[in-house]
Image (tube, grey):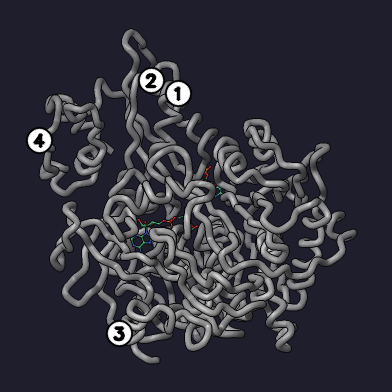
């Protein structure tokens, strides 16, 4: 099949044909038991892909390529400017290491269906641990290293892991972060206690080991390699927690079969990366982008993935991405726009690019936040390759809208991630549920069923899955993003319609930060909103109202509150601003007008054009707040 329109139509009208094993995308995967049908829609709104198929994701990512004679091909390149390390793993070498670590886990009693939490920096062992879980049918849950102990504890309690895999430390540009004390504290806070923790000791800051702890290297030395265990296509491969509107994160479940099929398809059709070609995704294994395009998709394809430990700038300079592309022969790179804004700030003319040979470089893919037209133009002018904005979410696991480089490249429209990817029946609805006219903003939704790879449910919480995503519009998944379609069918994503914010490409909940501020004994009520930031896209800003009779030194209180958010949510929240205000603007029913506050802080014309809802309780409260909201 060729051409975007044909592919899209078939994917929606005949999903069995498009995604099935006989004629469709599922044939690109090695099945232990091939599925006789693609989609099980017998229990809406719960849909399952490949209900009678069996496979092993690790086999498809590693063993399969070795067995096909590609064992010497490079699977993973670890490039770490922060430690001065470069290390390559062949497919055979990575398979052996993963099999041995799977043996370590099996030796600790981990079996099919058990959960393993992985709290690691960007080292190859993080990917090895993920693949080892997949190998024995265990369910991994990777927690981003920038989250603090209480956030890790919430995830430990929800996933109830038998084992946790961690490292002694992570290395940030300006400091070494000791992970082990954070892990110990999280286990202390959690009600659920893992039986064992496997700790990778790093020379930069070795950790003190406790009774529960097992040393990665010595356990690996003694381990017997474990084989791949066939699992049902519908069995969970991983749980990945993501921020929702409330403080409690959502455990997005990913299945084995749909995930493997969708990611393999996406590599050929969206990213145009094939076996033996090199993909460099600069993200973190703690985010969905890292799961899908650092670890699983490149390996399922038999391609080479670059796992980069470091930032785009600093250590030693803002030319590191160009160095990696040139040194490892990267064909396609994927990162968040914020990384390019950071490089542009340090090296606006791109002088550092001059010394590198980028002749093999073909595409730059950007996602994770809105791609502002200025960054798009800067990257296009500098790199002279297609710069592809694409839109997706933790829940979807792979792109919903993209310009499909492998299938049929389409003209780029700045501000748009281009068109719905085959499988994703995107619509924009008005609050009434009627389709919005072209170019008119509304809620971006996806008609059910969603394609393979999308979340089947939330971990242990079917009810929250339905309430969060499926109840706003019958028969549709609510993305939480607002925007429009234009007359050509291009998607424009304008921003979240809920209290989720996006800080340097990291998805965070303002609700979680509000819970922390509200726990301070002097705080009566509070609001946290995301405001525009030139580098990070958005940053959080807090507003607190003190309890009656409490007087506090504002700068001391601010420092204390900022410290609390850092300790309880994590440095990654970049929570650096909080103001004490006399009152918060509310509706007559008591809802804080966060959207109006955001509009005033960020809006054109100093926010003067921001509409004030007719439901406002006391407009003078908002007027008093205006100078504070605008004053940054
Ligand atoms: N472990 C521990 N701490 C971490 C961490 C980790 N894995 N990741 C980030 N942090 C800390 C940082 O050290 C920083 O701490 P500080 O306040 O003491 O300086 C804080 O969390 C904020 O980190 P970050 O948001 O990354 O800001 P930064 O100023 O260090 O770097 C960018 C800004 C834009 C360069 C960087 O965020 C980036 O490259 N982002 C784009 C790529 C990406 O990861 N996208 C994710 C989804 S695609
Ligand atoms: P995450 O689940 O961390 O991947 O974050 C998903 C959210 O990031 C989406 O719901 C959007 O709000 C935002 N996002 C991701 N990619 C894009 C994009 N290309 N354009 C606009 N917003 C994006």
**Structural crowding at the residue carrying mark 1, measured as other residues with C-alpha within 10 Å and reported as few (<14), some (14–19) or many (≥20):** few
In three-dimensional space, the C-alpha distance between marks 3 and 1, rounded to whole angstroms, equals 53 Å
**Structural crowding at the residue carrying mark 4, measured as other residues with C-alpha within 10 Å and reported as few (<14), some (14–19) or many (≥20):** few
Q: Are marks 2 and 1 in contact (CB under 8 Å)?
A: yes
Q: Nearer the viewer, residue 489 or 379?
A: 489
Q: Nearer the viewer, residue 328 or 323?
A: 328
Dot 1 corresponds to which residue?
Answer: 519
Q: Whereabouts is ligand 2, in terms of quadrant?
A: bottom left
In three-dimensional space, the C-alpha distance between marks 4 and 1, rounded to whole angstroms, equals 31 Å
Q: Are marks 3 and 4 in contact (CB under 8 Å)?
A: no
Residue 303 lies, in percent from the top left, at: 60, 80
Q: Earlier in the sequence, mark 2 or mark 4?
A: 2
Dot 2 corresponds to which residue?
Answer: 523
SS at circle 1:
loop
Check the image and name the residue furthest to the bottom.
Answer: 1
Dot 3 corresponds to which residue?
Answer: 5
> Is 238 situated left or right of 491 in this image?
right
Residue 441 lies, in percent from the top left, at: 18, 59
Q: Nearer the viewer, residue 602 or 323?
A: 602
**Structural crowding at the residue carrying mark 3, measured as other residues with C-alpha within 10 Å and reported as few (<14), some (14–19) or many (≥20):** few
Dot 4 corresponds to which residue?
Answer: 614
> Is 409 situated left or right of 208 in this image?
left
Q: Earlier in the sequence, mark 3 or mark 1?
A: 3
Q: Nearer the viewer, mark 2 or mark 3?
A: 3
Where, quadrant-wise, is the N terminus in this rendering? bottom left
Q: Is residue 64 above or below residue 173?
A: below
């Amino acid at each position: 099949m060729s051409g975007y329109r044909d592919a899209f139509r078939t994917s929606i009208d005949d999903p069995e044909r498009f995604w099935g094993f006989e004629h469709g995308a599922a044939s690109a995967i090695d099945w232990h038991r091939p599925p006789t049908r693609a989609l099980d829609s017998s229990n809406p709104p719960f849909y399952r892909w490949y209900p009678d198929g069996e496979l092993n994701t690790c086999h498809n990512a590693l063993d399969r390529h070795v067995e096909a004679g590609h064992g010497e091909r490079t699977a993973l390149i670890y490039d770490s400017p922060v430690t001065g390390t470069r290390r390559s793993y062949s497919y055979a070498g990575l398979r052996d290491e993963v099999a041995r670590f799977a043996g370590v886990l099996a030796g600790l009693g981990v079996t099919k269906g058990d959960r393993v939490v992985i709290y690691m920096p960007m080292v190859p062992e993080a990917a090895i641990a993920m693949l080892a879980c997949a190998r024995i049918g265990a369910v991994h849950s990777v927690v981003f290293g920038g989250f603090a102990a209480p956030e890790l504890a919430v995830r430990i309690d929800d996933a109830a892991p038998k084992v946790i895999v961690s490292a002694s430390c992570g290395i940030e540009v300006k400091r070494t972060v000791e992970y082990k004390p954070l892990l110990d504290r999280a286990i202390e806070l959690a009600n659920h206690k893992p039986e064992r923790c496997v700790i990778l000791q790093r020379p930069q800051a070795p950790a003190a080991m406790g009774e529960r702890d097992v040393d990665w290297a010595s356990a690996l030395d003694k381990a017997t390699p474990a084989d791949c265990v066939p699992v049902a296509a519908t069995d969970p491969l991983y749980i990945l927690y993501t921020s929702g509107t409330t403080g409690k994160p959502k455990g997005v479940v990913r299945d084995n079969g749909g995930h493997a099929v969708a990611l393999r398809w996406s590599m050929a059709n969206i990213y145009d990366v094939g076996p033996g070609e090199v993909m460099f995704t600069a993200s973190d294994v703690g985010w969905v982008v890292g799961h899908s395009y650092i670890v699983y998709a490149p390996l399922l394809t038999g391609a080479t993935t670059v796992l980069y430990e470091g930032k785009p700038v600093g250590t030693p300079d803002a030319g590191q991405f160009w160095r990696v592309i040139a040194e490892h022969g990267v064909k396609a790179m994927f990162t968040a726009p914020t990384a390019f804004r950071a490089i542009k700030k340090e090296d606006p003319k791109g002088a550092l690019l001059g010394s590198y040979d980028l002749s093999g470089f073909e595409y730059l893919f950007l996602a994770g936040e809105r791609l502002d037209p200025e960054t798009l133009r800067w990257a296009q002018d500098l790199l002279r390759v297609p710069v592809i904005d694409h839109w997706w979410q933790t829940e979807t696991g792979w792109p919903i809208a993209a310009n499909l480089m492998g299938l049929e490249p389409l003209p780029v429209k700045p501000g748009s991630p281009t068109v719905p990817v085959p499988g994703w029946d995107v619509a924009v609805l008005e609050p009434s549920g009627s389709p919005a006219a072209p170019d008119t903003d509304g809620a971006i939704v996806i008609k059910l069923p969603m394609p393979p790879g999308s979340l089947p449910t939330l971990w242990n919480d079917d009810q929250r899955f339905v309430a969060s995503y499926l109840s706003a519009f019958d028969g549709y998944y609510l993305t939480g993003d607002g925007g429009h379609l234009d007359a050509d069918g291009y998607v424009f994503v304008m921003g979240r319609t809920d209290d989720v914010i996006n800080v340097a490409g990291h998805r965070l909940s303002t609700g979680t930060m509000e819970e922390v501020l509200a726990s301070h004994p002097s705080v009566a009520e509070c609001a946290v909103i995301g405001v525009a930031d030139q580098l990070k896209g958005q940053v959080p800003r807090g507003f607190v109202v003190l309890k009656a009779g409490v007087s506090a030194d504002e700068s001391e209180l601010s420092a204390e509150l900022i410290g609390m958010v850092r300790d309880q949510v994590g440095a990654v929240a970049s929570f650096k601003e909080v103001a004490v205000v006399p009152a918060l603007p509310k509706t007559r029913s008591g809802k804080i007008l966060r959207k109006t506050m955001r509009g005033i802080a960020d809006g054109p014309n100093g926010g003067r054009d921001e509409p004030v809802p007719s439901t406002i309780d006391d407009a003078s409260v908002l007027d008093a707040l205006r100078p504070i909201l605008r004053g940054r």
